[in-house]
Structures are given as C-alpha cells and as structure tokens.
Image (cartoon, helix red, strand yellow):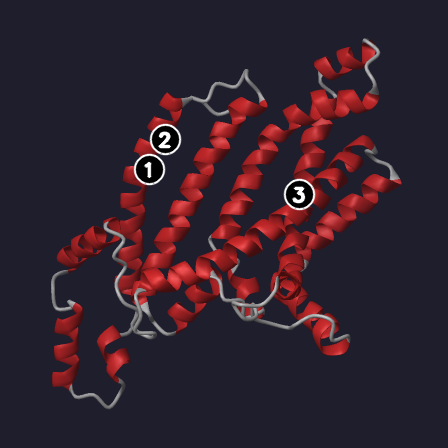
Amino acid sequence: MPRFLVQRIVLLIPTLLLASVLIFAIIELAPGDPARMMLGTEATPAEVAAERVRLGLDRPIPIRYLIWLSDVAHLNLGVSLVYDRPVTALVREAFPNTLRLALAALILSVTIGFPLGILSALRQNRPTDFLVTSFASLGLAIPSFWLGILLILLFSVTLKWLPPSGAGDPGQGFLTSLRYLVLPVVTIAVSNLAVFSRFVRSSMIDVLSADFVRTARAKGLAEPLVVYRHALRNALIPVVTILGIQFGRLLGGAVITEAVFAYPGIGRLVVTSILNRDYPVVQATLMLVVIIFLVTNIVVDASYAFLDPRVSPGRSPR
C-alpha cells in the first residue's frame, strides 16, 4: 500500500502541471484587461500601461506562467485585484465554510441515501422499490437553484423559521450557525442522496445475485448478516468511487447553491471573482479544486483494498 500511494502521489506532479497550464491559458484567453478593470474606464492609456507593468502583464506569457507557477509552489497566490487582499487569506476564510457545508451535506446524503438504496434492492420490483426510485429520479431532475429558491420562499419568507442567506457572524453559537446551514445542506443533499441511493441499489442488486451470497443463505446465515456483512461490503466498492467524486465536487465548491444562498464559501468566491475578473483569485481557486479532486481520488483508490482485500491497489477493481 505505501508503494502504491507513493506512485499515485508521484503521478500528481504531471497532472498538476497540465492543469496549471490549462488554468493559466484559460485566464489568458479571457476577454478584458485587468489593469483597465482596476483603474476604471476614465484612466489614461499611460496609467493603464504603468499598471500593466506593475502587475507584470507586460512580460511574455511563458515568463508570466513560470513566475505564477513558482509563486503557487511557494503558496504565494498573489493579491486580489478587487479586494486588495492576499488571495491566500480569502481562500483561508472561504474554505472552512465550504468544508462544513460539504461534510454536513455528505453525512445527510449517506445517512438517508444508503439505507434507501439497500431497502430498494431488497424490495426489488415492489412498491417500496418504485417509491425509492421515483424519489431518486425526482431528486436528480430538480435543479439545485430552483430547489434552493423554493426552500427560501417556504422556510424563510413564509414560515420565517430559517435565515435565507449568509453564514451568520463568526462569534455566534453552534445552534445559530446550524440554522444557516440547514437550507443549503438540504438543497445539496437532495441530489446527492438520490445519486447514492441509485448506485447502492444497482450495486446491491448485482451482489445479491452472486454465488457467494446464495451460498451464505444456503448455510443458514441470518438475512441481516448476509446483507450487511457479505453483500454490502462488496457492493460498496463502486459506490465509494461515486462517494469520493461527490465529496470532491462539494469541497471544490457547490457553486450554484452557495450563490443562491449567498454562502461565503469557495463556490461563491469563484463566482464573484469571475464576474469581477479577479484573475488571481480565479486561478487560485481553480487550482485548489483540481488538488482536492486529485487527493480525493487517491483516498478512494486506497480504500478499495480496505473494502475488499482481493482487490490489488495497483489496478482498478473489477
């Protein structure tokens, strides 16, 4: 296992380099001039030229890329063009909020989605299975922004039970912070638990028809023991992949949900930076999202050997 992890970590280097090239190229191809944006439309050409020199925009693109890559390697992400603050500080403030949102949404999704998927598989082609699959299809079909707006209208505007947006004050109590999390967490969890329930159902149906499950039942093992000790552990291998992808996506920033609820996380920071053409922040947050996805994939691959010792960590499970 350590050798496998070392190999995967080494492979991160060319992947990150390729991602950095793409991110830098996308920003360079974006319309607009950061110097002009900072100075405003009334700035003279001489002032814009001087600002471009100060920002280093007068240098060749390859040189700017190498300088930016060196700064990223030293965790020097530059200064925001809009907030006039270090990008590192902005990311440090936004990431814990997204982490809390992602963990809460993932826990809620797994707590509800996994039992629903197992129940649906055990009641295949019965009314229970129909209800669960219908709910999952509905959860996948509902747009997150629309669901979020409906929840705000119902629980914030009409019932006035929960705050409609934001994350509250830093010094507030736990229960007050929890009230701000409820609506965005539910909005994210609906689609995620639908995904988890469908994948758990599909994987469990495949495993329950396997020979080793029939053998365990023929030996007289109790049904809960057959389901949870033998079938579920083998069924989790493909599900863990989806779990890791969804968690990486949430940590990368639930962009739409955070924008709807004005939640101060990574997703909202990305949207605000793109709208304001705050290129240093956009580059930093995109690199952070790439790193999160890559690290999550390594953790998911390493978990295969724990779930099924027959799976070699050097190759994908079959």
Q: Cβ–Cβ below 8 Å for labels 3 and 2?
A: no
Q: Quadrant of the N terminus?
A: top left
In the rendering, at what x and y percent does residue 223 appear? Answer: 82, 22
Q: Which secondary structure, mark 3?
A: helix
Q: Amino acid at mark 1?
A: Leu
Q: Which secondary structure, mark 1?
A: helix
Q: Which residue is mark 1?
A: 12
In the rendering, at what x and y percent does residue 85 appear? Answer: 31, 70
Q: Quadrant of the C terminus?
A: top right
Residue furthest out toward the right: 127
Q: Which secondary structure, mark 2?
A: helix
Query: Is residue 78 visible in this depiction of the protein?
Result: yes
Q: Which residue is mark 2?
A: 8
Q: How many marks?
A: 3
Q: Amino acid at mark 3?
A: Val
Q: Is residue 190 left or right of residue 14?
A: right
Residue shown at 42% from the left, 46% from the top: 292
Q: Which residue is mark 3?
A: 110
